[in-house]
């Protein structure tokens, strides 16, 4: 009631929403047109006397141009080129800072990736990778790593040596666990892991002191580590579409948390500390099994949006919430 806070209810099916949440959120597969011979005509075959450049020759020429430019700029974009492997010439470009190989059919990153010691951004999303080589840890200046939309089942422990990393996007893979020492990535600001198969998180998560956004929706998480309380910089935490049945009592100390999504889980209750998160502005609790929520949520000084639809709220729990809303 009033313009400052909303309690939303809907007849939409929670199971349908859960199905939607659980879908992988990685790269959408794109169909790439075949590379046809150059043709001066719109339709039909080339005219007599027309020189037809074979697809492979054209690709080699195009690749050569890109590699030549990269020597001067330090940036190489080989995305959407139908590659099945990384051209060996790439690893001789030791001055590269940006390398994009997204949207190909690459299955392996070879150990020679360590040659690119000055690399700051590596984009390999939308390939067929099943893992990353241990040598990825040699890229000590790496600031951004995009590996979403692959078939990766585990991230190497050596990745935790990339302590300059600020962005790690690994959505839509097949990750079942995370490196035990993930918390060593103290510069990490944005960690995207939705649409994987994670059931738990390492205790070291609390070491991610710079983390501002943590996306874990559409996994199989059953619990959360209490060390989340140490994420002082965290502003967004996305956990919808998991198997959480309880929450740690950690939210009161998460002083920067503004958006928290816990929709489509298995929660029967939420801790009182949830109402003590000092900066919270939006809270998603839809599609759980909540019979009550902390009445103090209704009088939270910064909370503007509260989603509760799809919960069996009734009796005193609902009445207490409504009384709080009427008073605000």
Image (tube, helix red, strand yellow):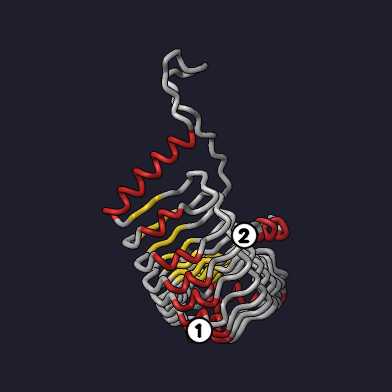
**Residue corresponding to mark 1:** 206
Q: What is the tally of numbered marks visible in this picture?
A: 2
**SS at circle 2:** loop
In the rendering, at what x and y percent does residue 243 appear?
A: 69, 71
**Residue corresponding to mark 2:** 151
In the rendered view, tell whether residue 314 sits above or below residue 172.
Answer: below
Give me the disc on residue 84: none
The crowd level at tag 1 (other Cα within 10 Å; few <14, some 14-19, many 20+) is many
Instruction: Name the residue at 65% across, 79% down.
Output: 223
Identify which residue, 113 or 296, lies in the foreground: 113
* Res. 272 in view: no
In the rendering, at what x and y percent does residue 177 appear?
A: 63, 74
Instruction: Name the residue at 42% across, 15% down.
Output: 49
Quadrant in the picture for residue 99: bottom left
Q: CA distance from mark 1 to mark 2?
A: 27 Å
Identify which residue, 43 or 53, lies in the foreground: 53
Instruction: Name the residue at 63% across, 67% down.
Output: 153
Identify which residue, 19 or 121, lies in the foreground: 121
Quadrant in the picture for residue 116: bottom left
- Left or right? Give the position of 270 relative to 191: right
In the rendered view, tell whether residue 86 sits above or below residue 177.
Answer: above
Between circles 1 and 2, the one closer to the viewer is 2
Instruction: Name the residue at 66% across, 60% down.
Output: 22
**SS at circle 1:** helix
- Left or right? Give the position of 94 relative to 274: left
In the rendering, at what x and y percent does residue 239 appear?
A: 59, 70
In the rendering, at what x and y percent does residue 193 appear?
A: 56, 66
Q: Earlier in the sequence, mark 1 or mark 2?
A: 2
| Residue that extends furthest to the left in the rendered view of this protein | 72
């Amino acid at each position: 009631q009033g313009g400052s806070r909303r309690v939303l209810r809907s007849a939409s099916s929670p199971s349908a929403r859960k199905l939607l949440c659980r879908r992988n959120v990685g790269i959408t597969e794109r169909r790439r047109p075949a590379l046809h011979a150059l043709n001066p005509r719109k339709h039909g075959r080339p005219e007599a006397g027309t020189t037809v450049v074979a697809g492979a020759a054209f690709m080699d020429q195009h690749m050569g141009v890109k590699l030549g430019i990269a020597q001067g700029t330090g940036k190489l974009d080989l995305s959407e080129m139908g590659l099945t492997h990384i051209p060996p010439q790439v690893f001789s470009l030791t001055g590269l800072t940006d390398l994009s190989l997204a949207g190909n059919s690459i299955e392996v990153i070879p150990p020679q990736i360590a040659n690119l010691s000055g690399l700051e951004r590596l984009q390999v999303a939308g390939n067929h990778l099943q893992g990353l080589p241990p040598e990825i840890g040699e890229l000590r200046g790496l600031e951004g790593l995009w590996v979403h939309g692959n078939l990766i089942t585990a991230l190497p422990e050596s990745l935790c040596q990339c302590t300059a990393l600020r962005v790690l996007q690994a959505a839509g893979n097949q990750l079942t666990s995370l490196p035990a020492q993930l918390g060593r990535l103290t510069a990490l600001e944005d960690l995207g892991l939705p649409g994987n198969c994670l059931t738990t998180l390492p205790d070291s998560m609390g070491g991610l002191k710079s983390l501002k956004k943590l996306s874990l929706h559409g996994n199989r998480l059953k619990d959360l580590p209490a060390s989340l309380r140490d994420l002082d910089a965290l502003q967004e935490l996305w956990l919808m579409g998991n198997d959480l049945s309880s929450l740690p009592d950690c939210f009161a100390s998460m002083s920067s948390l503004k958006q928290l999504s816990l929709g489509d889980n298995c929660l029967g209750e939420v801790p009182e500390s949830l109402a003590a998160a000092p900066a919270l502005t939006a809270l998603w609790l839809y599609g759980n099994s909540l019979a009550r929520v902390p009445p103090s949520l209704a009088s939270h000084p910064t909370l503007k949006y509260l989603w509760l639809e799809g919960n069996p709220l009734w009796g005193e729990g609902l009445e207490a919430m409504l009384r709080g809303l009427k008073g605000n």
